[in-house]
Image: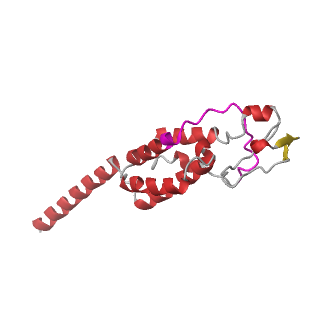
Amino acid sequence: MKNIRLRCACFFILLFFKAVTCISNPHIDSTKKLVSICRVWGFLKYYHPEVASGNFNWDQQLIEILPKVQKAATKEQLSKVYIDWIVSLGKVKERNIKIRDDYFNHNFDLTWINDSEIFTTELSQKLEFIENNRNQWLKRSDHASKNGPNGATLKDGAIIGKKLFTHSSRHLFLETHL
């Protein structure tokens, strides 16, 4: 009987130490990592100005980043992979133009950016900065002179006269003219 109690006590002690180890250094399972890379890759595709401008082979970037994401075991390691990737894409300039976001945000959810279970605060802040400073391909000087992208003319907020997007464009853009 003492042998069974001793085994049970050892089992619970080992279980306790395993739980403490998992809490202090939680590993991210492969499903969460896969979901996170899909979200970050898709987000950067449309929000990072260098990527949205078509300056990168974005599918190739995904193939190159996947092994690094797979190797990351903790949220700190995973966030470092993403931060290094974002930095390698180029600097995002702070915008001075206010964009009205109240038109198409009804079913639009970027709350995953602040998921503290997967991302560090530093990465969340970097992603929020990119979100708040997106859509930079319409320059302020273009806006002021009523010229749109690709030489199109803006008249009363409508783009006329030229094809707005070329086959290499990857822009998702909405700007309201106040």
- Magenta-drawn segment: 86-106
Decide: is 168 above or below 91: below
**Left-right relation of 27 to 94:** left
Does the magenta portion include 94? yes
**Left-right relation of 138 to 16:** right
Residue 134 image-quadrant placement: top right
**Left-right relation of 39 to 29:** right
Decide: is 53 above or below 34: above
For the point 55% across and 42% down, the residue is 127
Front-lying residue, 153 or 46: 153
For the point 21% across and 56% down, the residue is 13
> Residue 12: where, in percent of width, then height?
23, 59
Front-lying residue, 178 or 114: 178
Q: Please name the colour scheme applied to the rendered image.
A: secondary structure
Decide: is 68 above or below 137: below
For the point 77% across and 49% down, the residue is 164
> Residue 27: where, in percent of width, then height?
36, 53
